[in-house]
Image: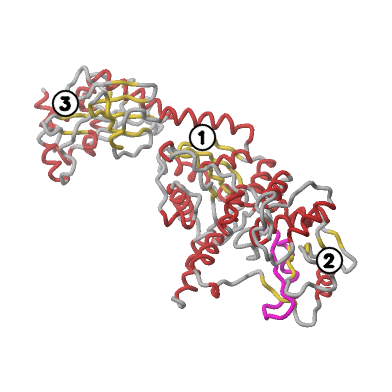
């Protein structure tokens, strides 16, 4: 086991985000395997004060976070915690050593990059870090420390989100201390500092969290969730209602496309992949302006838009795609272990699919993270509020309409397999009999109207076409038929279908005679009941001719859709159709013999 751990972590590091790697490392790996990347030691020959003066001489943007009041003396057993601007890290590397001594230092980059993060996360949210650096004051001993207000805020943040119960602070006002022996006197220090600032705070964990939130210094929602993954005790501070809705009602997903994707000309393809193959409905597409980019950059991912485990950084946020997943899938326990806030397994699958799709189109040396997503619907709405607060209410109303329209009130017996790109098929109890309800997405009502029209017209002309039992604004109900072909081998199905060839071709002829082409007629549209009755289903693609071919043999279902001289299709169509040769000749044989039977 000991020999496996390093290579296991290396494998994870190459394939998972740093925060996830650290979660697994901290929870699944032995303590001695953890490697604190932030720890340094002041090099031999340099004192603490000498270090501070040298950093000032080199114009390093930094802040010494705490316990600096006694300089040049330093509390025994305490390390020096520095927050350093990531661009200045290289300026100070030679001032430290990895060899242990009695002057330990912990370095954190201001944005969590350079490997100097807090378990894969920025030590503070980026706006917080920038305020600390910008507001730093210089002491007589040339130490850059937080101004008093930010010192209080940064110490409160550290006590609440990094230490929590270990801080010795009570959870709520009037409660008992969570730890009677904290490593530092946070309750006394924070209470005294609050009084000095004239703040009426009881300095409990809850009240300090509220104070930081009110002053826009608390972690953003998604950063708070990641911190909770590191310290599960933070859960009492989470205002998380992400689990209210059932997955049966669908789920809103926010995808934030990163600038690298647009710069490399991959966005349109990615967007199409998301709609066509992942079958998501795009609720809104927002190209971020300057202000929106700034808000998203600071408010999403905890301000960390670095490269992570990828070759290069994916850039900042560029486009918001707020989508609706009609058919979520319950996440496995294994997935929830790594991503505890993901309930819909599709989110992880979609994100992995899109990243792979993009990576296959660029050189391996140019791989980057092209897209970021929310973990659940609650987080998706948080992203929408950050980027487009004026549109969020109307988008929520639209989602409510989508959910109501897609809901099935009748008792559902079974969900039938289908692509579900435009509609879902359910076996329902309709007035005591089994029936099939086909419910269309509100964005696909053209297909609904077309199929409803075909069923209503042709069920009166042919016993092979089922009639409509009931209908709504976006659904219809037809009788349920058992399919005797189901479960048979393809060769056996072909044998049975060939014996019904004349009936199958007669359907094509009927549609032609009435001025229609089926366009997508194939073996999946044909059922044979246990009683031997042929049933034809699924007419979403049916097309009414504008200029009907003169002869059945030249109908679109037989020879395909002709093209004009400019390469476009005739009759206002934008895509080809299945032909007899493609779909039926391999099963039924040449068309000629059936034509003779028809005449």
Q: Give the residues drawn in magenta, as a range.
A: 85-111
Name the residue beneath numbered marker 1.
283
Lower sequence index among marks 1 and 3: 1
Q: Residue furthest right?
A: 140
Lower sequence index among marks 2 and 3: 2
Which element is circle 3 on?
helix
Residue 432 vs 134, above or below: the answer is above
Label at residue 69: 2
Which element is circle 2 on?
loop
Q: Could you tell whether 392 is left or right of 141 in the image?
A: left
Residue 283 vs 345, above or below: the answer is above
**Residue 427 falls in which quadrant of the image?**
top left
Say how many tags the image has.
3
At x 27% / y 19%, what residue is drawn?
Answer: 456
- In the image, 61 versus 248, the foreground residue is 248
Label at residue 506: 3
- Whether residue 65 appears in magenta in the rendering, the answer is no
Can residue 93 be seen here? The reply is no
């Amino acid at each position: 086991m000991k020999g496996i751990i390093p290579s296991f972590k290396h494998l994870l590091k190459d394939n998972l985000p740093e925060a996830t790697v650290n979660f697994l490392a901290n929870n699944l790996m032995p303590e001695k395997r953890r490697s604190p990347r932030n720890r340094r030691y002041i090099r031999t020959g340099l004192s603490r004060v000498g270090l501070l003066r040298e950093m000032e001489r080199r114009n390093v943007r930094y802040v010494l976070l705490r316990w600096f009041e006694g300089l040049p003396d330093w509390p025994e057993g305490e390390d020096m915690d520095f927050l350093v601007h990531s661009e200045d890290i290289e300026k100070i590397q030679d001032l430290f050593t990895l060899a242990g001594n009695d002057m330990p230092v912990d370095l954190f980059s201001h944005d969590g990059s350079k490997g100097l993060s807090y378990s894969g996360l920025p030590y503070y949210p980026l706006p917080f870090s920038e305020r600390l650096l910008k507001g730093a004051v210089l002491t007589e001993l040339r130490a850059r420390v937080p101004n008093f207000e930010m010192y209080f805020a940064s110490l409160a943040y550290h006590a609440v989100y990094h230490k929590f119960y270990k801080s010795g602070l009570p959870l709520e006002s009037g409660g008992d201390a969570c730890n009677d022996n904290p490593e530092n006197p946070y309750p006394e220090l924070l209470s005294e500092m609050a009084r000095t600032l004239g703040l009426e705070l009881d300095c409990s964990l809850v009240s300090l969290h509220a104070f930081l939130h009110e002053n826009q210094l608390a972690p953003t929602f998604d950063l708070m969730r990641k911190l909770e993954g590191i310290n599960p005790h933070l859960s009492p501070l989470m205002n998380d209602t992400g689990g209210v809705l059932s997955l049966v009602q669908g789920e809103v997903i926010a995808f934030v496309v990163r600038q690298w994707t647009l710069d490399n000309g991959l966005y349109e393809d990615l967007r199409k992949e998301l709609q066509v193959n992942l079958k998501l409905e795009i609720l809104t597409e927002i190209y971020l302006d300057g202000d929106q980019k700034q808000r998203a950059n600071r408010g999403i991912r905890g301000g960390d838009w670095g490269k992570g485990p990828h070759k290069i950084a994916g850039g900042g946020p560029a486009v918001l795609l707020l989508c609706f997943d009609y058919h979520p899938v319950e996440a496995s326990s294994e997935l929830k272990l790594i991503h505890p806030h993901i309930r819909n397994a599709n989110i992880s699958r979609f994100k992995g699919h899109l990243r792979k799709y993009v990576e296959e189109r660029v050189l391996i040396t140019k791989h980057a993270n092209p897209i970021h997503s929310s973990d659940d619907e609650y987080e998706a709405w948080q992203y929408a509020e950050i980027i487009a607060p004026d549109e969020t209410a109307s988008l929520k109303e639209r989602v409510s309409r989508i959910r109501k329209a897609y809901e099935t009130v009748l008792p559902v017996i079974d969900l039938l397999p289908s692509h579900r790109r435009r509609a879902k098929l359910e076996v329902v109890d309709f007035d005591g009999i089994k029936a099939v309800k086909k419910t269309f997405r509100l964005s696909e009502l053209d297909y609904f109207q077309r199929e409803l029209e075909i069923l209503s017209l042709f069920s009166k002309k042919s016993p092979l076409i089922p009639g409509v039992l009931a209908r709504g604004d976006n659904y219809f109900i037809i009788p349920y038929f058992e399919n005797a072909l189901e479960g048979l081998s393809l060769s056996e199905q072909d044998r049975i279908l060939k014996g019904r060839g004349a009936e199958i071709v007669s359907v094509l002829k009927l549609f032609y005679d009435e001025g229609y082409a089926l366009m997508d007629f194939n073996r999946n549209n044909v059922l044979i009941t246990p009683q031997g009755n042929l049933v034809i289903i699924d007419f979403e693609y049916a097309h009414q001719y504008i200029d009907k071919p003169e002869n059945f043999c030249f109908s679109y279902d037989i020879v395909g859709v002709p093209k004009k001289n400019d390469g476009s299709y005739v009759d206002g169509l934008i895509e080809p159709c299945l032909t007899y040769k493609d779909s039926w000749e391999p099963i039924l044989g040449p068309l000629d013999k059936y034509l003779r039977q028809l005449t």
